[in-house]
Image: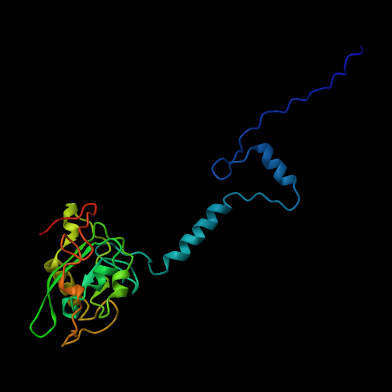
């Protein structure tokens, strides 16, 4: 049996780092190959020059950031922020509470002598609200609108459950800051619209033991009775 011919093995010298190590991370062998390639030129520091060019372009442009929270940008009209309840526009029909899939809106009313409804309780539990906006679409008088705080951070978790007084205070502060303009762009009316046709469901609490939907055991919901 003849032995296989031995093939000469040529050992390649180890690649040495490039002399210009600050601007190029290629080895000397790779630099030589790049120089021998067709249409390929080695330009040291070209990437740094391009980056500085982009930086200098933005120096003379107005800044696109703001110093939050000292400065705040205007929230878009359809942004899903915290809900604002405007008591002067509410008729107590409980349509918003019936449209809420999470049951985080509690409305209790009582009839008046003139046939309208008196709003005894109006509370929103923002801890279980998913900001779907169905309540704002269902309200016939736009008494509840999205346009409140979007950075609702509290130290106590129960503070996100807001009763009628807290909701009215937040709505009044919003109107004062925006010169009486609602989140939907309408101007505040001197004589707010009220209905004279109370609904049957509006006379009873929507949530709770006596509500038309029966008792609701929601996660984290407070019992303020």
Picture quadrant where residue 96 is located: bottom left
Which residue ends up furthest to the left in the rendered image? 113
Q: Position of residue 20 (x, y in %)?
A: 58, 41
Picture quadrant where residue 83 is located: bottom left
Q: Is residue 27 above or below residue 167?
A: above
Which residue ends up furthest to the top in the rendered image? 1
Q: What residue is at 51 percent from the left and 61 percent from the top?
A: 53
Q: What residue is at 76 percent from the left and 50 percent from the top?
A: 38
Q: Position of residue 174 (x, y in %)?
A: 20, 73
Which residue ends up furthest to the bottom in the rendered image? 191
Q: How many numbered marks are there? A: 0
The quadrant in which the N terminus is found is top right
Q: What residue is at 74 percent from the left and 25 percent from the top?
A: 11
The quadrant in which the C terminus is found is bottom left
**Residue closer to the observer: 14 or 198:** 198
Q: Is residue 191 above or below residue 9?
A: below
Which residue ends up furthest to the right in the rendered image? 1
**Residue closer to the observer: 223 or 54:** 223
Q: What residue is at 21 percent from the left and 52 percent from the top?
A: 220
Picture quadrant where residue 86 is located: bottom left
Q: How is the image coloured?
A: rainbow
**Residue closer to the observer: 158 or 20:** 158
């Amino acid at each position: 049996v003849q032995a296989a011919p031995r093939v000469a093995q040529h050992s390649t010298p180890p690649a040495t780092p490039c002399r210009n190590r600050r601007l190029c991370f290629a080895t000397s062998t790779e630099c030589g190959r790049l120089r021998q390639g067709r249409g390929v030129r080695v330009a040291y520091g070209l990437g740094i020059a391009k980056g500085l060019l982009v930086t200098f372009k933005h120096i003379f442009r107005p800044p696109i950031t703001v110093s939050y929270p000292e400065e705040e940008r205007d929230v878009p009209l359809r942004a899903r922020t915290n809900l604002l309840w405007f008591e002067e526009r509410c008729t107590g029909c409980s349509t918003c509470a019936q449209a809420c899939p999470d049951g985080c809106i509690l409305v209790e009313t009582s009839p008046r002598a003139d046939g309208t409804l008196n709003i005894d309780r109006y509370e929103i539990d923002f801890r279980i609200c998913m900001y779907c906006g169905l309540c704002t679409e269902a309200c016939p008088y736009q008494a509840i609108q999205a346009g409140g705080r979007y950075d609702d951070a509290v130290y106590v978790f129960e503070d996100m459950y807001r009763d009628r007084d807290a909701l009215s205070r937040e709505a009044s502060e919003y109107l004062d800051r925006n010169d009486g303009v609602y989140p939907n762009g309408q101007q505040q009316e001197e004589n707010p619209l009220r209905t004279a046709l109370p609904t049957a469901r509006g006379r009873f609490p929507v949530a709770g033991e006596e509500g038309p939907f029966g008792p609701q055991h929601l996660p984290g919901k407070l019992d303020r009775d």
